[in-house]
Amino acid sequence: MSTPLMLGGSAVVPSLLLLWYVYARDRNPEPRGLLLKTFLLGAAICVPVVPVALWLESLGRQWETGVWSTALVRAFLGAAIPEELFKYLVLRWYVWNKPAFDEPLDGVVYGATASLGFATLENILYVGDGGLGVAVLRALTAVPQHGFTGVVMGAFLGRARFAQDEAQRFGLLASGLGWAILLHGAYDAFLMTGTGFALLALPALLTSVGWGRGLYKGLQREQILLGTSLVTRRFVVKEPLQAEEPARMAVGGVGPTTVSAEPGVAHVRLANRPPREPQRTFFSWLKLGLGGIGLSACGLAWLFVAAILLGEPLGGEVAVPVVIICAIPTTLFLLLFRSGLRGPFEAEPA
């Protein structure tokens, strides 16, 4: 009884780490209560997805005439279409009209949250039968695939949420759902061939991750630009200013500046240059990677210890040292992961 609990729980750690990464990079963090509800709704849609997927797959049985046709039917009708459709419904029917959804980047955060909620419960169902090896494999492949597919869908929905034209909004919504289905279906189809073509699932995964990161970074840059406003300052000019550079120095501004050349009181309108998005160094990515892998391993260790203690209660002289032994590396890897989130970043050019 304790073994399924341990294996099922092992799916939670990588999902939460990826969700933490997405959440920590948002300059205007979303309400945690709304994120939790979105995560739980993402997990809950596993219930209606199963009968819908079985029904759609049964409709496609007539086309299963070979390896590729069978793989495509199972990948798209049995997985990608129903799963991504229900994730889309969570975003469109639940998150869409929430007051906290107030900028395009929020679509990425909620899209990843709903997808990782689904991936977490799906993993629990899979690893209950497949064991620890399946848990580790899915933590490295299926969880990022679900997460970044949600990022891609969320990026399109985030833009659609603030589109001015109805036709443009419909196009963005359709594109977000369509691309999510295509990315998910392609990844699953290669795996379901059961042949050497299954190796192509890795490039499909990397495509989702690379495109998702690109869309996320683009929306982050827009978030910075939208948060940068023109400021008007009132100050006293003690002597005539003839050049732009002294004017900028007088008010501590940057960028184009307009200033009165006569002594007296002047109003200066500053166009502040938005800060460049910080770029992580290799050392920062290394800390994130090692911290994430270490926390995943520690999560499995904690679940293993919990399973032992629940299955066969041990005395305090044994349980306490075991807990301490697990707590020390968990704390160290947690600090390493948090340090990776904070940098270092490349220096901004002058």
Image (cartoon, grey):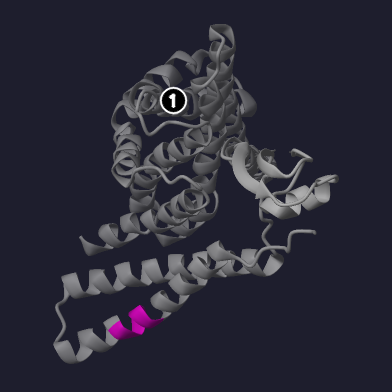
Q: Report the amino acid beneath label 1.
A: Tyr
The percent position of residue 148, horizontal first and vertical second, equals 55, 41
Residue 138, given in percent of the width and then of the height, sits at 49, 51
Instruction: Report whether residue 64 is seen.
Output: no
At x 34%, y 43%, the residue is 31
Q: Nearer the viewer, residue 196 or 15?
A: 15
The secondary structure making up most of the magenta span is helix
Query: Which residue is rendered at x = 54% and y = 37% of the image?
Result: 151
Q: Farthest residue in the top direction?
A: 167
User: What range is drawn magenta here?
Assistant: 324-328
Viewer-nearest residue: 279 or 236:
236
- Relative to the observer, which residue lies in front, 306 or 1? 306
Q: Residues within 10 Å of mark 1 (few under 14, many from 20)?
A: many
- In the image, taking residue 255 as reference, residue 3 lies left or right, namely left
Q: Quadrant of residue 57?
A: top left
- In this rendering, the answer to whether 35 lies above or below 154 is below
**Residue, disc 1:** 88
Q: Is residue 337 above or below residue 110?
A: below
| Rendering quarter of residue 280 | bottom right
Does the stretch in magenta take in 137? no
Above or below, 335 relative to 72: below
Quarter of the image containing the N terminus? bottom left
Q: Is residue 78 visible?
A: yes
Residue 175: name its quadrant: top right
Q: Is residue 174 left or right of residue 202?
A: left
Q: Is residue 29 left or right of residue 180?
A: left
Q: Residue at x 71, y 52 (%)?
A: 238
Q: Position of residue 86 (x, y in %)?
A: 39, 25
